[in-house]
Amino acid sequence: MSWIALLLLGVAVTDLVFSVRPMRRVPEVVGAVAAVLLGLAAGLTSGRDLVALLGIALVVLAWGQTVTRGLGRGPAWLPLLVLWSGLALGVLVSGAAPGAGGLVGRWLDGVGLPLLDGLAPDRALLLLGVVLIQLSTGNVVVRLVLAATHTLNPARVGTPSDPATRLKGGRLLGPMERLLIVALSLAGQVTAATIVVVAKGLLRFPELQSRREQERIHRLTEYFLVGSFASWLVALGGLLLLG
């Protein structure tokens, strides 16, 4: 699973860099370089690994380029196709991926943290990738799904007609919610994670029923439901990869 972990890390770094400094081309280049360097640091230096690292870098670059267009005037489904195709291919060839080690393995052996004690390098990289993907990338995926389903018009993002300006806090609550779901599920508290999902709906219910929003209530409800399910699927997808 080391190759999948590096793909997740490259995509996550791309979106985190873009959220801090929204520049063209730079975030995806940083993400691709980060994935390759981390792979080399993990001891993935065989010919097969180098081919895989090149493929990961290309997917990360394609993700960054298509996301920029998908949230502009380009097709919103294209970056989603790039991401899911890369992950699907990674799962198919995951059996051929060698175990990670190198500097990463030695660091894990000597770090001395109880949480990381006995954690294999492959598992550590995958866990890090799943956690980071819940942050900025989760929000990007949600907005792409909203745009692809025509629930959200990217041209109106940030304007008064953008439902996100009415359902405030989603960009912050989304990552917090996904991280909490992942953490509780990994801790074996699946029931608690389910309560988090239910609680979000209950807390949003008064906002969705606001009298001032009656003219837009159906649009807001669709926005909330599509966005919430897309956000939850990002968290559940990460949990599936962690097994």
Image (cartoon, helix red, strand yellow):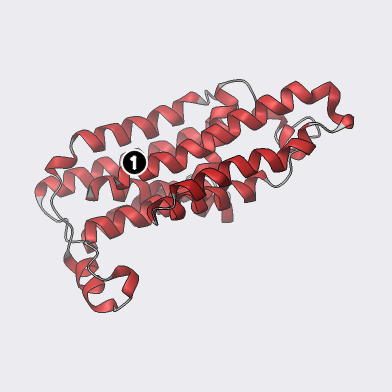
Q: Secondary structure at mark 1?
A: helix
Q: Position of residue 227 (x, y in %)?
A: 59, 33
Q: Position of residue 85 (x, y in %)?
A: 33, 30
Q: Name the residue: 62% across, 29% down.
A: 225
Left or right: 235 as drawn, with respect to 221 = left
Q: Nearer the viewer, residue 240 or 77?
A: 240
Q: Nearer the viewer, residue 145 or 219?
A: 219
Left or right: 70 as drawn, with respect to 44 = right
- Location of mark 1 (residue): 240
- Number of numbered labels in the structure image: 1
Q: Name the residue: 40% across, 27% down.
A: 81
Q: Is 99 above or below relative to 102? A: above
Q: Quadrant of residue 119?
A: bottom left
Left or right: 179 as drawn, with respect to 127 = right
Q: Is 206 above or below relative to 129? A: above
Q: Is residue 68 visible?
A: no
The amino acid sitting under disc 1 is Leu
Task: Look at the image and tell me in which quarter the C terminus lies.
Answer: top left
